[in-house]
Image: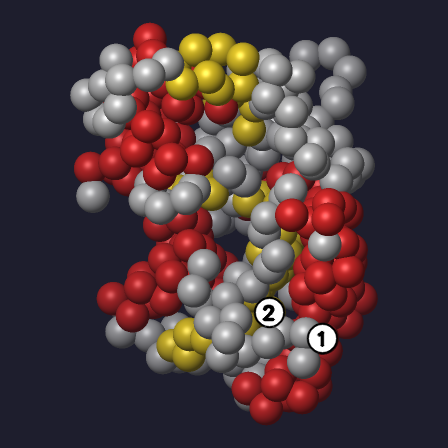
Amino acid sequence: MANRIVISGAGGQVGRALAADAGRRGLDVLALTSAQWDITDPDAAADIVARGDVVVNCAAFTSVDAAESEPERAHAVNAVAPGIVARACASAGARMIHISTDYVFSGVVDGPSRPYDVDDPTGPQSIYSKTKLAGEQAVHAALPEAHVVRTAWVYTGVGSDFVGVMRRLAAGEDPVPVVVDQIGSPTYSVDLASALLEIADRPAAPPLLHVANAGAASRFELARLVFELVGADPSRVVPASSEDMPRPAPRPPYSALSGRAAAAAGLTPLRPWPDALAAALAR
């Protein structure tokens, strides 16, 4: 892979994992945090992006609940800015990989649930998810050959992500209520980063892909396995409903992603989510 990898949002968990993986492989990497590259600034994008680059846009307004009270900021970063980056890539002769989300789906399914494929109808329910879908559309309007990669429930296992929080709570003694009626595809940031680098090396990869660890789990199941893997009593994780634990933004009740299109394109499938979780907690 001779091209320079340019990462926006390199301070976030996906950006950090991607920069670390690319660095380990000896690739030419320019990793910029949101403070170093404001993707809402068209002049900044024009100054940074060069011919032959592969730009991976990991920058986003990711606080699902905060977006409900800060819709203008969420719209600027998630909906408008990806189009700015895509236009800069088109102008410079660079490629682009843009990270999107499982939350673009409504999660309301008729009949038995099945993981969402790339061609399933979207139906975003929150400000965050609506701005992320608009960002996908802005990217492809400016650069149709760009790769939009939807992923889900990304964690590193430390800090404030769901797995990191459950790991911290496991060290206590109190019961921990966790919702049972939200089901998705937990995705380890390290595995996602590896997949993004594979896509960076594959210009002919499809323009819309789902990349997540294989399988589906409820938040409750995920939390219980975290407790089990760190040696805590999983029975301390107690089931709750979304109604019991209301949040400002609605979440899809079901948003597991199918990797069928990525596998059909010859991309390496991600390992099952329990295996990835065990690896993350063992690091």
Q: Which residue is mark 2?
A: 96
Of the residues tagged 2 and 1, which is closer to the observer? 1
Please indicate whether residue 31 sits to the left or right of residue 140 in the image: left
The quadrant in which the C terminus is found is top left
Q: Residues within 10 Å of mark 1 (few under 14, many from 20)?
A: many
- Pinpoint residue 169: horizontal percent, then vertical percent: 32, 28
State the count of labels.
2
Q: Residues within 10 Å of mark 2 (few under 14, many from 20)?
A: many
Most foreground residue, 165 or 157: 165
Tell me if I can see residue 271 in this picture.
no
218 is higher (above) or lower (below) than 130 = above
Please indicate whether residue 196 sits to the left or right of residue 136 in the image: left
**Amino acid marked by disc 2:** Met
254 is higher (above) or lower (below) than 156 = above
Please indicate whether residue 273 sits to the left or right of residue 134 in the image: left
Measure how far apart labels 2 and 1 are at the Cα level: 12 Å
53 is higher (above) or lower (below) than 265 = below
Q: Quadrant of residue 179?
A: top right
Which numbered circle lies on residue 254?
A: none
Label 1's element? helix
Which numbered circle lies on residue 84?
A: 1
Q: Which residue sits at x=27%, y=74%?
A: 26
The quadrant in which the N terminus is found is bottom left
Q: Mark 2 or mark 1, which has the lower sequence index?
A: 1
